[in-house]
Image (tube, rainbow, N blue to C red):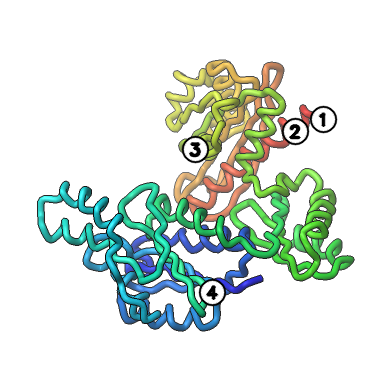
Amino acid sequence: MRAAAVLVVGSELVTGVRLDTNSTEVTAALLAAGFAPDEVVARPDDEAAIAETVRRLVDTHDLVVVTGGLGPTHDDVTREAVSRALGLPLVPDPRLAERLTQVARRHRDPEAAAQVVRQADVLEGARVLEPATGTAPGQVVSGPWGHVVLLPGPPHEMRPMLESFLGTVRVGVAPRFVRCVGISESDVQVTAQRLLDAYAGIGFTVLASPALVDAVLFDAGAGGEVLDRAAAEIASALAEDCYSTDGSTLAETVIALARDARCSVAVAESCTGGLLGGALTEVPGASDVFCGGIVSYADDVKTSVLGVPPGTLQDHGAVSAETAAAMAEGVRERLGADLAVAVTGIAGPGGGTPSKPVGTVWFAVADADESSATLRHLFGDRDGIRTRAVVTALDLLRREIGGRAR
């Protein structure tokens, strides 16, 4: 695999004012395109620091992807820094300049307008990546050093340009992802490693995120067909704990299963505050099967909107098997879904008791005939608990729908 590096630019990223998500997305896309990212670097909006880093990275990598610092403000200096690093002059692109001049007319201050037009400056010989949103174009410059790609910082501007570029330079064999849920990282690793001992030419790693684990297989000479065979064996050994071998997310898998089963789905949420419905609606075409959701954070909403009996809340509390089941039954009936899942719990940092500590979360799944509740004791901070709760709810839906198909 060809070596790649990622450089994220922005003082706000280095100082922690804003979270860097670009490096994660870019490295994942590079892996899928057959590259081997082995370094991620962050630099502030400092021309000299960016230039020095680019010079170092191009000496040891076939591909360097730089995100950020291409906009119209005073601290957007990536163009100038890369020009300095590679010894390539910046030249105005007439077509870009014409388009950006139209945009600049919306600005009242002449200096602000001039800064907008400055985005038309491109490295000599560069291929322009047109923006799908925003005003900053991307650039690709190739030379003895390989490829250097400049992409905007905002993720929604960066993503389509990255995909456009990678569509022209995909190399080698893409990794295979065996995606798992409801199983520990170590268990996945041991199961996969035992099977991979029979293979040569396959690299292997395990990637974990809250409540999810990916076994990633890399081509080290085995070839794509052998990778597919190994991935299928691992998936079979992991059985129901494996939800995808084609790169699908857990939410995408749930939507696909529901569509195949012609099963409509609804959700009722308390502690997750809409995150569960949001995960499902991130999937294109989710409206084929997802009816909707109700966020019933307050107890009176659980009663007035979902129909949870006041006595249930009084006798068992909002975080209980009985309340979760009533929430699932209520949302299923009100939204006319075939299947519903509910989640109610204590995400913290406060609100816990000795009998119901922070991380106590009840889930329930209901259909037209019955409902069943499941207790989980989740760990982490507030965000971690909520994220794990969403994953757990999706997994309960996946297993329920998958069981019906069998």
Q: Earlier in the sequence, mark 1 or mark 3?
A: 3
Q: Which residue is mark 1?
A: 406
Q: Which residue is mark 4?
A: 39
Q: Secondary structure at mark 3?
A: helix
| Image position of 251 (left or right of 369) | left
Task: Please state which amino acid type lies under the numbered disc 3.
Answer: Gly
| Image position of 226 (left or right of 219) | right
Task: Please state which amino acid type lies under the numbered disc 1.
Answer: Arg
Q: Residues within 10 Å of mark 2 (few under 14, many from 20)?
A: some
Query: CA separation, marks 1 and 2?
Result: 7 Å
Q: Earlier in the sequence, mark 4 or mark 1?
A: 4
Answer above or below: position of 293 versus 307.
below
Query: CA separation, marks 4 and 2?
Result: 40 Å
Q: Which residue is mark 3?
A: 278
Q: Residues within 10 Å of mark 3 (few under 14, many from 20)?
A: some
Which residue shows up at 53% across the image and 37% down it?
276
Whether residue 41 is visible here, answered yes or no, is yes
Which residue shows up at 32% across the image and 57% down it?
136
Residue 76: which quarter of the image? bottom left
Task: Please state which of the two labelled residues, at mark 4 or mark 1, is closer to the viewer.
Answer: 4
| Image position of 369 (left or right of 236) | left
Q: Which residue is mark 2?
A: 402
* Discs 4, 3 touching: Cβ within 8 Å: no
Task: Please state which amino acid type lies under the numbered disc 4.
Answer: Glu
* Discs 1, 3 touching: Cβ within 8 Å: no
